[in-house]
Amino acid sequence: MLIRCISCGAEYDLDDVIYTCSKCDSILEVLIDPQVSKDIFKCRKSTMWKYKEFMPVDESKIISLDEGGTPFIKCDRLGEELGVNLHVKVEGSNPTGSFKDRGMSVGITKALELNVDTVGCASTGNTSASLAAYAARAGLKCIVLLPSGKVALGKLAQAMFHGAVVLSVNGNFDEALEAVTALALEGELYLLNSINPFRLEGQKSIGFEIVDDLGWRSPDRIVLPVGNAGNISAIWKGVREFYEAGFIADLPRMTGIQAEGACPITNAVRKGAEDIIPVENPETVATAIRIGAPVSSLKALRAIYDSDGSSDTVSDDEILDAQKLLARTEGIGVEPASASSIAGLKKMVQTGEIDQGEEVVCIVTGHLLKDPNTAINACKEPISIEANAQSLSKVLKGL
Ligand code: F0G
């Protein structure tokens, strides 16, 4: 096992505290090649640690809240409406309500291995909520930088309640990340944004679970929201590792969805470019993916190109409509960023980019309650009645 630069191939030790390549400044990945049979996963508890042989940390130090093992829901009603064979992977069911918990479990375990005492991140909300919880469980100090006024209420409540030092930054996510990265490079804290390759090692377990849930085969396509571009890279790494281990015979097409106001990855894919041009002043109702300069863009573009995948954008209205559609046809409540995967799927079936009848897995990344304000604003006021049967009956008759 080692850390390797994805551009120049320079190699580093697993215990080097390093976020970018010291030779060419590109991003890093962890290389791992366990020689195991998939039979060892049988009868294990359904968490991401079911696949512990594929996780590059010391098993005796694992900090876990039983993340992973999330619901994999067959959505026939919605699938029929959209024209595909649809499963939804519900990452809002993780301990703090988003997929970030998978990455934090590995990232915080690594922090303990390295004997650091302070961890930190910049975040659009979910990363900070997750980091705060896992740092609390590990007994580490935690500092999070959030773009002022642009973090959904549930996420802010979590970060504060778990005891992180919460800094409200006068700037957007990209600027906050630059600031905290500079501090991390000076050794002031251990950075747990997804530029840290150990974060993605946890998140790749989403890919493991999808193929395991399907009975050791790949779906035609995985569709997910893309913000800082870590998750699409991680899931692609996961399915590739299981493919290379001989556990599955095919690979899925990775399909990344971005908001129209924050779409550097889609812009690059449309041009066939190898890297992005950052979007200045990104804006979208899906604040989780309000990001203009994704740090994992090189990995994400490779995932899309190597898998013969694609990328598209959706408008804020399309996101909010899809959020409601999923909630009301399948009972799955997700935050706006998560719904962009459903909105993108709908659009790409309409444009013909996704074929009718394809077997698609949509990743919905965070829980509805992360952003209660957007949910309430999308609904009518509750109906006010007197506390008697007559008033209730009147309402029921009007349904
Ligand atoms: N969905 C949700 C709910 C998110 O919180 C994020 C990212 C994404 C999708 C995009 O994933 O960045 O790996 O491409 N949230 C980060 C945060 C940026 O700070 O919580 P990505």
Image (cartoon, rainbow, N blue to C red):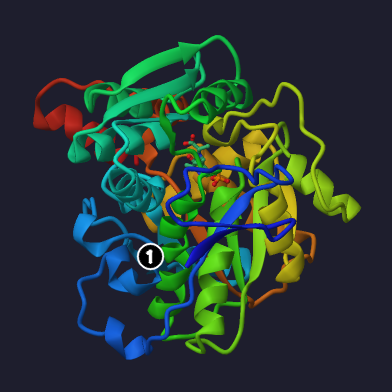
Give the residue displayed 51% in from the left and 68% down from the top: 238
Pointer 1 residue: 55
Q: Nearer the viewer, residue 21 or 90?
A: 21
Which amino acid type is shown beneath numbered disc 1? Answer: Met
Tell me if mark 1 has few (under 14), some (14-19) or many (20+) residues whose alpha carbon lies within 10 angstroms of its own: many
Quadrant of the rendered structure where residue 189 is? top left
Secondary element at image label 1 = loop
Quadrant of the rendered structure where residue 395 is? top left
Give the residue displayed 47% in from the left and 87% down from the top: 247
Q: Nearer the viewer, residue 227 or 376?
A: 227
- Residue 253 vs residue 104: left or right? right
Q: Residue furthest left?
A: 388
Give the x, y percent position of residue 42: 26, 85
Q: Nearer the viewer, residue 207 or 180?
A: 180
How many marks the image carries: the answer is: 1
Q: Quadrant of the C terminus?
A: top left
User: From what the image shows, is residue 104 above or below residue 204?
Assistant: above
Res. 206 in view: yes
- Residue 75 vs residue 315: left or right? left
Give the residue displayed 43% in from the left and 25% down from the top: 152
Give the x, y percent position of residue 92: 36, 49
